[in-house]
Amino acid sequence: MSAGEATPRRRDAAATRDALLVAARELFDANGFRGTTVRMIGERAGVDQALIARYFGGKSELYQAVLADAGAQPEVAADDGPPPRERTPREVIDLFLARVDEHGVGPVLRALMAPETDAETLDAVTARLRERVIVPLTRSLKAAGVDDPKLRAELIVAQLLGVMTARANGSLPLVSAADRDALADLLERMLCA
């Protein structure tokens, strides 16, 4: 290469991938899945949108990568680590309330609640929620002798998702303003009666 020729720019694949994840997380959070385009993500990340296909396969796979990367911002069912142990209903209540109070609505909750979430992403999120929360809660309920522990576990989680949503968006002012411990006590009595 002669002295006058430009040196080709070196690619940093890890930095590009990280930039796409950060941009996608911000845009999916602000606009939802359908309201976010690959062009918007590429522009926010400062890279060619075609790199989304290269690093992730497509928009849906990038969304799932954002969900998997949610461990960087604590979220329901996003903790990686040892296999989940049994969780009591109170532990699940405390976990859900703490996550929404301390971190707001994150990508996993958004994916679970958004009607526009594609089936593949919803399946991935639901599988993670089942593995990390519902199955351990079911084991705990079964050990306690509760009738139909699988259904009871899903009902507890479904009700908590509604409480989290109302607490985060303020749609039910008393739920939003309630002291976390007092709310947890009441939920435990209601859900575990």
Image (cartoon, rainbow, N blue to C red):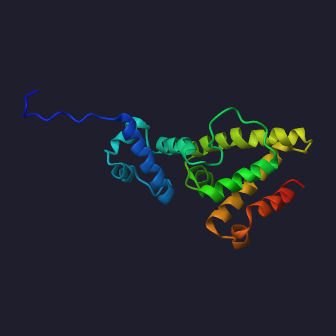
Does residue 40 appear to the left or right of 9 in the view shown?
right
Image check: 122 left or right of 23? right
Q: How many marks?
A: 0
Q: Nearer the viewer, residue 109 or 177?
A: 177
Query: Among all residues in the image, which is located at the extreme right?
Result: 145
**At which x and y percent is residue 8?**
20, 34
Residue occupying image coordinates x 76% and y 36%: 85
Identity of the residue furthest to the top in this view: 1
Query: Residue at 57% of width from left, 43% of height from top?
Result: 71
Q: Is residue 77 above or below residue 169?
A: above
Give coordinates of residue 54: x percent, y percent: 38, 36
Residue at 83% across, 62% down = 186
Answer above or below: position of 163 versus 7: below
Classify 71 as above or below 188: above
Depicted 189 relative to depicted 137: above or below: below
Residue drawn at x 7%, y 31% is 3
Q: Is residue 157 visible?
A: no
For residue 63, say whether it is visible. Answer: yes
On the rendered image, what quadrant is the C terminus found in? bottom right
Instruction: Name the residue furthest bottom.
Output: 173
Residue 143's quadrant in the figure? top right
- x and y, in percent, of residue 145 in the image: 92, 41
Instruction: Classify residue 63 as left or right of residue 176.
Output: left
Q: Quadrant of the N terminus?
A: top left
Counting from the top left corner in percent of width and height, residue 109 is at 62, 53
Which one is in front, 173 or 124? 173
